[in-house]
Amino acid sequence: MALHVTSEQRLDDGVLERRFDLGEIPGILWTPASASASAPVPLILLGHPPLGLSRMYPRLAGRARQAAAHGFAAATIELPGSGDRPRWPAIEQARADLRRTMQAGEPVGDETVDALILPLVERSVPEWRSALDALLALPGIGGPVGYSGGVISLGIRLAVTEPRIAAAGLFAGSLVPRAVFEEARQVTVPLHVLLQWDDEGNDRQAALDLFDAFGSKDKSLHAHMGGHTGVPGSAGEDAVQFFARHLK
């Protein structure tokens, strides 16, 4: 798929922000002022939850500008069924089923997790790989490539199937299908995993079991006290330092 830039602006710190369409998939690319055809910079793919790029923009832009300050380009794309992309009734139903289960205080079963996560992973991974093809063809963007954040199952599948990804920073979550849990044993790239110890939406022990299952010899778990939205500001800097060690 061809990448078509729809708008661009230079931010106050010199970062160039370009919005683009990859076919019918919207995305955003941020590049530091230092990037050029003669001096291409590494790329970090910014994962995010399926809440829509507009809603996630402030957080994504903050992460991208932090990455740019360390000499990285960063890019993201809209997930299927999110933002302005066509609705996905099956996923919407799975989300509604999950909300009802959690509100009732009942355990989330494998069938619900599979219905919510597996279709998203199956559809999203080829799109992220196509985006990577197009982004690496741009002047000023080079390898190696990192993946940061987002739906952890998507990050696991990309780490297993995309050889251009050299390191991954993942946000721990417990809604991981058994099939993806088994794939985690095949992950070998360096990992930096962030866990909120009191995350109200995740099962801590399941997240710890997943970390234990990762096959990477170079993996670290960074746990912080607090709920899902209590991630300390220092966590972002720690993640960028991880990528600085492995992508430069």
Image: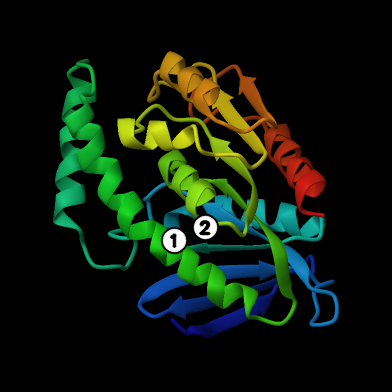
- Tell which of 36 and 210 is nearer to you: 210
Q: Which mark is residue 57?
A: 2
Tell me: 245 left or right of 190. Answer: right
Q: Is residue 194 left or right of residue 72?
A: left
Residue type, numbered disc 1:
Ser
Q: Position of residue 202 (x, y in %)?
A: 40, 23
Residue 27 drawn above or below residue 53? below
The residue pinned by badge 1 equals 54
- The crowd level at tag 1 (other Cα within 10 Å; few <14, some 14-19, many 20+) is few
Residue 73 shown left or right of residue 209 in the figure: right
Q: Judging from the image, what secondary structure is the residue with disc 1 in? A: helix
Graded by Cα atoms within 10 Å as few (under 14), some (14 to 19) or many (20 or more), the crowding at tag 2 reads few
Whether residue 79 is visible to the viewer of this picture, yes or no, is: no
The quadrant holding residue 28 is bottom right
At horizontal 53% and vertical 48% (from top left) the residue drawn is 159
**Residue 83, horizontal then vertical, whole percent:** 34, 62
Q: Is residue 116 above or below residue 131?
A: above
Query: Decide: marks 2, 1 in contact (CB < 8 A)?
Result: yes
**What residue is drawn where x is 15% and y is 51%?**
90
Q: Is residue 9 visible?
A: yes
Q: In which quadrant of the rendered view does residue 96 lie?
A: top left
* Residue name at image x 40 percent, y 31 percent: 181
Give residue 120's position: percent from left, percent from top: 31, 51
Give how far apart the Cα atoms at labels 2 and 1 are.
5 Å
Number of numbered callouts drawn: 2
Q: Assign a secondary structure to mark 2.
A: helix
Residue closer to the observer: 106 or 45? 45
Residue 136: x and y in percent read: 63, 73
Question: What sort of colour scheme is used for the picture?
Answer: rainbow
The residue lying at 17 percent from left, 18 percent from top is: 104
